[in-house]
Image: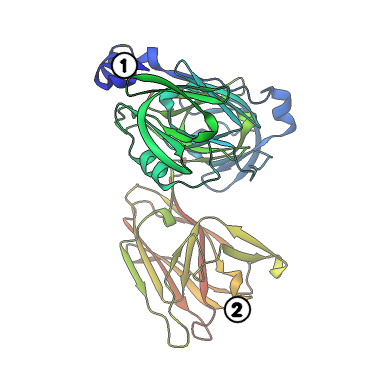
Amino acid sequence: MVFRLHAHAFQQTIRKFPYLFCVLLVGQLLPAVLTAQEKNPLELITVSGETIPATVTAIDKDGKLTGENIPEGLDLDGLREIRSGTAATEQKPRVVVHLANGDLYADQIKIADEQCEIQSSIGDFKFGIESMKGVRLQPDKPLESFDEALSKPLEALDQIFIQVDGQFQRIEGILDSIGAGKISIEYEGESRELPLDRIYGVVVASIADDGQRKINADLQLRNGSRFLGNIKSMADGQLEVNVGPFADIKIPLQAVARIKVRSSRLAFLSDLQPIVVEQKSLIVTVSRPWQKDLSIEGHPLTLAVDGGKSEKIYNKGLGTHAGCKLVYKNDGDFDRLAATIGIDAETRRRGDCIFVVLGDERELFSERVRGIDEPKQIQLNIKGVSEITLLVQPGENLDLGDHADWCDARFLKTAE
């Protein structure tokens, strides 16, 4: 553990021998055989919203996908999501390993010789300790001081949280190992062993990070683990993902429940900040502010379909009311605006309003929508347009029940 006491020397060594410190996390989660993939194909959701059942056999360094039923030329940047047929579980982990941008859940953990080994319900992992920010051994108990230390790690020493007289206290030292029911640390120049059941967790010393790493995916594993990273490639059923300054990990695709891709060709309006916001409700209703990814009443965005027999929920979008005006800058040189519009199901099929889209003050779209109408998908050409205005005007019955949803509202860069 000496190198973490000499941060400057360590960083200089890395600059000279960058590959020496590349950490490879080898997943042993589940057999990654193609026959298993074929039994449980993935769903690829493109930036345009199309869902494609497919089997992915490889992803090259440029992000291009190959496999069965994959459109020619499709790459990661052309996707918004990858889904498996298995949802993530809701069970609580016994151990949480904190990465730079997310967490890995485990049942057991062992740390020795700068390596961390974890066992989980979806398999075993092994990776370098420098890829983690900390480990929480009692995640069922909240501890504010641990959270604060995790957000501000020390440069040279680890922080160990130990139970003393019924209270957790923080000490500064060096973590040597965890295993066999005990933890070994160097504290005040001496090596000490403590029972593991007295340890809440450890925040490891920070390693310099310039923060320039690319992040193109939000990954959720079948056991509920979730973290951000950069998908570098995939071969033989193994995803290689960079999760930290010196940490590349390999994860079997079979262990993944969902991947939300951060495409440069897609920008949800609910993730952007409008440059103009106006809300002028009529006197018959109570004025409610517009909402990001929720209806104006604070519920999930929901549109009735099949004549009101069922409902569809949207995770992204804008909840507005008649009289609402939102203006967005097209800073990303996007050439399409897409959305599914309708009156939110919370009105019980009431409402009557007019959805309007302006491009640089020129009308691109206008249509009356009632609560009894089916949702309508729109995709408008905004090439060369610098400002996009979303406007909702009241229809009949003033603005009563005009809970206007711009579901999945997004800017797109098409492949044309």
Callout 2 amino acid: Arg
Percent across and percent down for residue 55 are 66, 31
| Residue 198 seen anywhere in this rendered image of the structure | yes
Looking at the image, residue 295 sits to the left or right of residue 92; the answer is left
Height in image: 239 above or below 295? above
Rendered image: mark on residue 14: 1
Q: Secondary structure at mark 2?
A: loop
**Disc 1 marks which amino acid?**
Ile
Which is nearer the eye, 225 or 146? Answer: 146
| Contact check, label 1 and label 2, Cβ < 8 Å | no
Which residue is rendered at x = 56% and y = 38% of the image? 225
Q: Which mark, residue 350?
A: 2
Give the vertical position of 166 relative to 95 (above or below): below
Q: Pick whichever, 286 or 118, lies toward us.
A: 118
Q: Position of residue 102 (x, y in %)?
A: 47, 38
Is residue 98 at all visible to an observer of this figure?
A: no
**200 or 377: nearer the eye?**
200
Percent position (x, y) of residue 118?
57, 26
Q: State the CA–CA distance, disc 1 to disc 2.
A: 64 Å
In front: mark 1 or mark 2?
Answer: 1
Is residue 383 found left or right of 400 in the rendered image?
A: left
- How would you rate the neighbour count of disc 1 (Cα within 10 Å): few for under 14, some for 14-19, many for 20 or more? some
Tell me the quarter of the picture where residue 150 sits: top left
Q: Quadrant of the N terminus?
A: top left
**Crowd around label 2: few <14 · some 14–19 · many ≥20 (10 Å):** some
Q: Position of residue 339 (x, y in %)?
A: 51, 58
Residue drawn at the location 27% of the way across and 19% of the way down: 6
Determine which of the numbered discs, if any, sits on residue 49 in the image. Answer: none
Secondary structure category for the residue under label 1? helix
